[in-house]
Each structure stands twice: as structure tokens, then as C-alpha cells.
Image (spheres, rainbow, N blue to C red):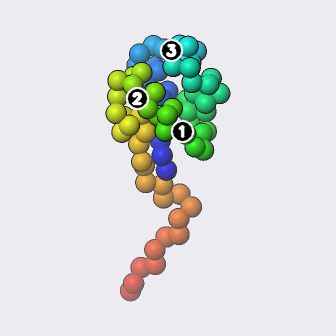
Amino acid sequence: MIRCHFARLLGERKLKISDVTRATGINRGTLTRLYYETAERIELGVVDQLCRYFGVGVGELLEYVEDTAGLPVPETVP
């Protein structure tokens, strides 16, 4: 699964979603979904704007985390 570190970046910089909306023009609803990690998709332009705004790379904003929940357990060979 993909983890979004938008909320952490906001907290570290003591910013609010409205601050980022004002500075970037990104829709508040989009930023709210990123904050709560409920977004199902994100435009590359939004990723680009957020990376520029925070001065971070994509890997600092988004992270791939192995999701083992719901996967079948491999059978063991005796």
C-alpha cells in the first residue's frame, strides 16, 4: 500500500491544510483526503506542487509499504 506523509509534513512545519491550499491552489478536499490517507488517486501535478512547496522528494511525501493483510498465507512444504 502507499502511505502519504502529508500530515507529518504539516505537523513538522506547524502548518494547516488551509495554509497549503492558499499557497498552492490545491483543492482543500484533495488535501483533506491526503491528510487522512483516504485518497484513492492523486494527480501527478498535485504531487509535483506538494513536493515543491515542502521542498521534499516524492519518496518523502509518498512511501510504499508492504501490505500483508488479506493475503493468503503460503503453504509450507513438510
Tell me if 27 is positioned left or right of 49 in this view.
right
- The amino acid at mark 1 is Glu
Quadrant housing the C terminus: bottom left
The x, y position of residue 33, in whole percent, is 61, 33
Helix, strand or loop under label 1: loop
Q: Which dot marks residue 43?
A: 1
Q: Residue at x 50, y 14 (%)?
A: 23
User: How crowded is the residue under tag 1: few (<14 C-alpha within 10 Å), some, or many (20+)?
Assistant: few
User: How crowded is the residue under tag 2: few (<14 C-alpha within 10 Å), some, or many (20+)?
Assistant: some
Alpha carbon separation for disc pair 3 and 2:
13 Å
- The amino acid at mark 2 is Cys
Residue, disc 2: 51
Q: Quadrant of residue 62?
A: top left
- The amino acid at mark 3 is Ala
Query: Can see residue 24?
Result: yes
* Mark closer to the chain start, 1 or 3: 3
Q: Residue at x 55, y 33 (%)?
A: 34
- Residue found farthest to the front: 45
Q: Are marks 1 and 3 in contact (CB under 8 Å)?
A: no
The x, y position of residue 15, in whole percent, is 48, 14
* Mark closer to the chain start, 3 or 2: 3
- Depth check: give the residue in front, 45 or 65: 45
